[in-house]
Amino acid sequence: MPESEKYAHPLKLNEAWLCLDYANVIGWFVLENSADALTYLHLLSWAKQAEVVQEKTFATLQHQAQQHPKKAAQVVQQSLMLQDTIYRIFSTHTANKLPDSKDLDQLNLLLSDTLKRAQLVSEQGKFAWTWSDANTQLDRPLWPVIWSAAELLTSVDLKRIGHCASEDCLWLFYDTSKNRSRRWCSMKICGNVAKARRHYARHKDALQK
Ligand SMILES: [Zn+2]
């Protein structure tokens, strides 16, 4: 099985915000494997599935990574650092604490590089954002993630960000429910496990009576 497909299978993208999906999925990958196991191809495959890069950019960047393995390895280190930074900033916020200034400095540093790449284009009477040098820069998959983190930190109700209620799960989510009742990263995964546990406990109680 190709490396990219190995990673593709357990990938779950269900957040309204790309930066949260990124922090959850890359963090999960590191927990399940190790930081050393993350390759540039994993990162690129994630970006393709999250529709951060299109097929053509995927192929070009994959080729670029083969040509420049050292630079690709640096981007992988950068991507791990970005995951940690995003995760810590939002986790700290869910705990009603202020972010560490080092984390914010780090995000600002990445943001200033990212903003240099942002460009406006005119398409059929409308304007849209695009990225310059998108096919040649190996850190291209990270730009929309960094952008998303900056947008989420500044433009919406941050109280909607939460942590999954499962003790075994560290994922972050953005609660879009009307009454802010979301508890799980995903009802299909952690929500169902909790339901099954409650069901099992009730069943066990009933049998013991
Ligand atoms: Zn969960």
Image: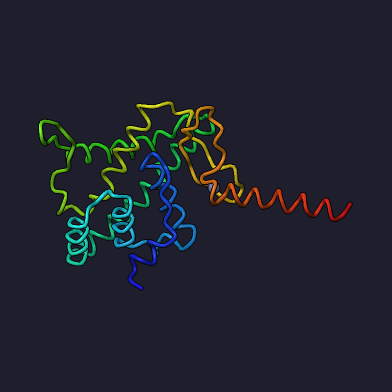
Whole-percent x and y of residue 20? Answer: 41, 42
For the view shown, which residue lies furthest in the right direction? 209
Question: Residue at 51% across / 30% down in the picture?
Answer: 97
* Quarter of the picture holding the N terminus: bottom left
Whole-percent x and y of residue 89? Answer: 43, 37
> Image height check: is 148 above or below 139?
above
Question: Residue at 50% across / 28% down in the picture?
Answer: 178
Question: Residue at 40% across / 33% down in the picture?
Answer: 101
> Image height check: is 30 above or below 24?
below
- Closer to us: 169 or 82: 169
Total labels: the figure holds: 0
Whole-percent x and y of residue 190? Answer: 57, 49
| Protein image colouring | rainbow
> Image height check: is 151 above or below 83?
above
Determine which quarter of the picture holds residue 59: bottom left
> Image height check: is 2 above or below 17?
below
- Closer to us: 197 or 110: 197
Q: Is residue 149 left or right of residue 24?
A: left
For the view shown, which residue lies furthest in the bottom direction? 1
Q: Is residue 141 left or right of residue 123?
A: right
